[in-house]
Each structure stands twice: as structure tokens, then as C-alpha cells.
């Protein structure tokens, strides 16, 4: 078995996870009785595994249902690029596991933030919106759960750009967002809400407390430190 095999990847998740959180509807304050438990994690593969031609996997699904994890370097690269899914892992209110290295990762989470979030969050929301419009043009109904999460993404991105920190829990908007999910909100109203959030996000970036660029040096220092410690064990 090589370390690229799925079973070996699951071993890395089991033995080297440094951070595991609950994301999705339970972290957003939007859970219902039917909601799954979405888990996301970060594992730090021992540095010697990178010395061979076959590298450890950068992403592993499982072993639990609705669970996926990133290798530390891949996770950091995505977070530096303001990937919304990855950033919310660092701000999830539901932390199930954090080793000392995981606590160090959480301690530097602000280093990942920058005004690049403005562009990234808008791009993700725009891509989702175009797919939903396509569903309507083709005579079908949009996937209302996806509509809800598109709006939630814009709410989170606006809070990040305005206040310098992602917003994960949107429980104060629960009733309105769940009405969207149930298909009870007219499409015109959804378009108006989306346009308002998009305009607010565009207008907030010039006054944002976020730095123009993330602190790559701080993130890289942590990555190198964790890698070195894995060699010396």
C-alpha cells in the first residue's frame, strides 16, 4: 500500500489530525432535525513522508460520513487565498479537537486574512448564483438549499470585509434563511437581497480593516515549525 491509497490517507487523518471542527448548518445556526454533522479537519503529515516520490494526500474524505480533511500545507494555501470553506474552519464555534499544533494554527488565524476575501467571496457567490439561474432558465426550480447558502456566504463575506473577521453563526437570520431553503421566498426578493449584499460588500472594501495581503511569513513560519517537530519525534 502506498501513502496515496485511501486507507493510508485515513490513517493520516486518524493519527495526525491537529484540528477538527463542525461546520455546515450546525455551525451556522441553521440546523434542522434532518441536518447532517459536517466535519472538517487539518492533519499534519510527518515531514519524512514528503521525502519520497509518492507524497501524502493533500485531501482526504472520511472516515466518518460528511467528514473531509486537508493536509496542513494545502489548508494553509487555501486559507491564504481566502477560500471561504477553509476560513470558516478557523472560526467555527464548534471545535471538536485541537492539539497543541492545532491551537497554534488557531492562534495565527488572523494572519490568513486580507482584502482578497472581497474578491473570493464574491466570485464563489456569483458562480453559485449563475448555476441557480441556469436551473430556472432550464425550466426547473433552483436547489433552495444552495440558494440559502449563497446568501449566507455573502452575509459572511460582508461581515469579514467590514469587521475583519469571518462570521460563521448567522442564527439571527435563521428564520429568513430557512424560509429561503423551503422555497417560500420569491425569486425577485432573493435577487434583491443578493444584489444588496453584493453592493454592500463592494462598498465596504475601501474602508475594510483587513490588510491588503495576508501575513504569509507568519503562516510559513508555523508550517516549517510543525514540519521540523515531526522529524524530531
Image (spheres, rainbow, N blue to C red):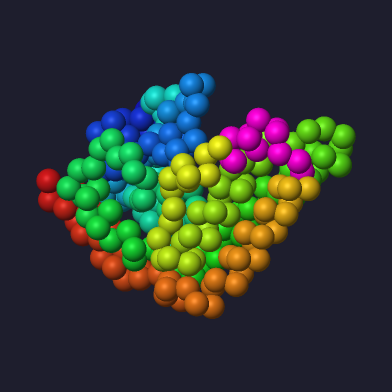
Does residue 176 appear to the left or right of 186 in the view shown?
left
Residue 179 lies in the magenta-colored region: yes
Q: Looking at the image, which residue sits at the far top? A: 33
Q: Residue at x 29, y 68 (%)?
A: 218
Residue 48, percent from left and from top: 25, 48
**Above/below status of 232 relative to 164:** above
Q: Quadrant of the N terminus?
A: top left
Does residue 197 appear to the left or right of 72 in the view shown?
right
- What segment carries the magenta color? 176-187
Residue 55, percent from left and from top: 38, 45
**How many labels were placed on the picture?**
0
Q: Residue at x 24, y 48 (%)?
A: 102
**Above/below status of 209 relative to 67:** below
Q: Residue at x 52, y 58 (%)?
A: 157
Residue 45 in view: no
Residue 11 in view: yes
**Above/below status of 13 relative to 160:** above
For the residue pair 24 and 53, the one nearer the viewer reads as 24
Q: Residue at x 34, y 66 (%)?
A: 111
Q: Quadrant of residue 97?
A: top left
Does residue 68 appear to the left or right of 126 in the view shown?
left
Residue 87, percent from left and from top: 43, 53
For the residue pair 30 and 56, the one nearer the viewer reads as 30
Residue 117 lies in the magenta-colored region: no
Residue 60, percent from left and from top: 43, 36
Amino acid at each position: 500500500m502506498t501513502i496515496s491509497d485511501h486507507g493510508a490517507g485515513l490513517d493520516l487523518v486518524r493519527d495526525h489530525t491537529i484540528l477538527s471542527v463542525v461546520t455546515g448548518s450546525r455551525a451556522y445556526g441553521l440546523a434542522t432535525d434532518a441536518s447532517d454533522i459536517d466535519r472538517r479537519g487539518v492533519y499534519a503529515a510527518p515531514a519524512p513522508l514528503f521525502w519520497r516520490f509518492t507524497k501524502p494526500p493533500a485531501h482526504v474524505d472520511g472516515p466518518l460520513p460528511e467528514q473531509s480533511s486537508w493536509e496542513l500545507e494545502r489548508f494553509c494555501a487555501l486559507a491564504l487565498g481566502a477560500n471561504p470553506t477553509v476560513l470558516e474552519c478557523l472560526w467555527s464555534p464548534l471545535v471538536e479537537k485541537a492539539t497543541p499544533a492545532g491551537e497554534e494554527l488557531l492562534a495565527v488565524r488572523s494572519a490568513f486574512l486580507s482584502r482578497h476575501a472581497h474578491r473570493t467571496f464574491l466570485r464563489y457567490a456569483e458562480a453559485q448564483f449563475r448555476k441557480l439561474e441556469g436551473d430556472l432558465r432550464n425550466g426547473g426550480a433552483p436547489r433552495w438549499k444552495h440558494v440559502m447558502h449563497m446568501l449566507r456566504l455573502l452575509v459572511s463575506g460582508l461581515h469579514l470585509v467590514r469587521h475583519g473577521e469571518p462570521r460563521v453563526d448567522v442564527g439571527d437570520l435563521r428564520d429568513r434563511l430557512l424560509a429561503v431553503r423551503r422555497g417560500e421566498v420569491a425569486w425577485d426578493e432573493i435577487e434583491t437581497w443578493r444584489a444588496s449584499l453584493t453592493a454592500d460588500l463592494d462598498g465596504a472594501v475601501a474602508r475594510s480593516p483587513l490588510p491588503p495581503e495576508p501575513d504569509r511569513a507568519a503562516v510559513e513560519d508555523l508550517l516549517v515549525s510543525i514540519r521540523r517537530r515531526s522529524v524530531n519525534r
